[in-house]
Amino acid sequence: MSTVEIDALGLAQALIRCPSVTPKDEGVLDVLTGALEGLGFVCHRLTFSQDGAADVSNLYARFGAAAPNFCFAGHVDVVPVGDAGAWCVDPFAADVRGGHLYGRGAADMKGAIACFAAAAARFLASAPDLAGSISLLITGDEEGPAINGTAKVLRWMAERGERIDCCLVGEPTNPTRLGETIKIGRRGSLNGRLAVHGVQGHSAYPELADNPIPRLIAMLHALTAEPLDGGSDHFEASTLAITTVDVGNPARNVIPATARAAFNVRFNDHHTAAAVESWLRRRLDALGGAYDLEVAVSGESFLTPPGRLSGIVAAAIVAHVGTPPTLGTGGGTSDARFIKDVCPVAEFGLVGSTMHKVDERVALSDLDALTDIYADVLGRYFEAA
Ligand SMILES: [Zn+2]
């Protein structure tokens, strides 16, 4: 049993004051480790540096040794501030103004990490005989390439036989109001780079050349003329967005040899990335002609079907804000895409309307409410365990 209290606002401020723009740590994990060790967590600092990417520090902290192990996951790295002069405050000063905590990472997602530590402190003080464990899996590489982050921590855990039984990721899932949305899955994301090849020539003699541009246009039309699907039970329809078309031809009288385009596919649980790639190639092959398609997958789609974890989080939200959340799957990817291979995972955090923006901030009342909700989630999880 612990009698230590953690003030979510104070801890959030201390975390924000470390300018941990990916992949820099700047002391942020020391701050968090200090708070968790004070509660009796055993902390493992995990620095990974392979694969040509920058060194990244991560943290796995666990209180208790018994099962079940409830894990909270998140990231302490933040995106750059952009134009610091456009902020109304120093982005790393963690100032409080008008009932809001300002700073890079306040919403995404140092605020939620502080709330979770505060909730764990409160819960442990009330649960002297905890039959189970609470853990935190915190990475410094979520906003970056995510190579030396959560995926490698999970591999390290698997090698040690370190097991988590369910995981709540504290990403800012609420569009405008705390309690609006739990995420129970995410769409997959695939980037395609298409190059169409022809034969260069004089534009006055097009019969002596092979212009790749009309074929590129026809191919892009073929990729966008009909949707990949009509959505599924928990997902919107998959989308394909053309992100650039490049020929880069400075001459007016030359037919170029190559024309390029790029696009991004966000796909739902009807597809795997491999199936999306075959769908793309079938449509391109049907038009014929020489082309190259390079595909890079940044994540598969996944869904934790509504069940015990989302039910517990939803019940805690209803108890504190009065209305039930929606169970969503929209938005970008998160590290839940790695954790879903290990255990049921859901995401719930602060309001994300200012994330990655100038003047990122969270309401102080939301820090209090999120701490209450997380503490309630722990209570309901272990009460039923
Ligand atoms: Zn985030």
Image (tube, rainbow, N blue to C red):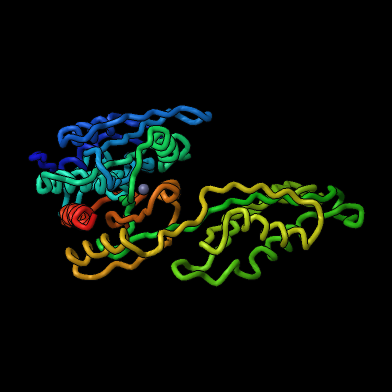
Q: Quadrant of the N terminus?
A: top left
Q: Nearer the viewer, residue 98 or 49?
A: 49
**Residue drawn 29% across the image and 64% down it:** 311
**Residue drawn 45% across the image and 52% down it:** 333
Where is residue 53? Give x, y as percent.
49, 31
Where is residue 312? Give x, y as percent.
26, 61
Where is residue 74? Give x, y as percent.
33, 44
Q: Is residue 8 visible?
A: no
Q: Is residue 291 visible?
A: yes
**Res 141 → quadrant:** top left
**Residue drawn 42% across the image and 33% down it:** 159
Q: Is residue 151 above or below residue 217?
A: above
In the picture provided, is 75 more to the left or to the right than 379? right
Q: Nearer the viewer, residue 290 or 243?
A: 290
Q: Nearer the viewer, residue 140 or 243?
A: 140
**Res 49 → quadrant:** top left
In the picture provided, is 196 more to the left or to the right than 272? right
In the picture provided, is 376 more to the left or to the right than 147? left
Where is residue 76? Give x, y as percent.
32, 39
**Residue drawn 69% across the image and 65% down it:** 221
Q: Quadrant of the C terminus?
A: bottom left
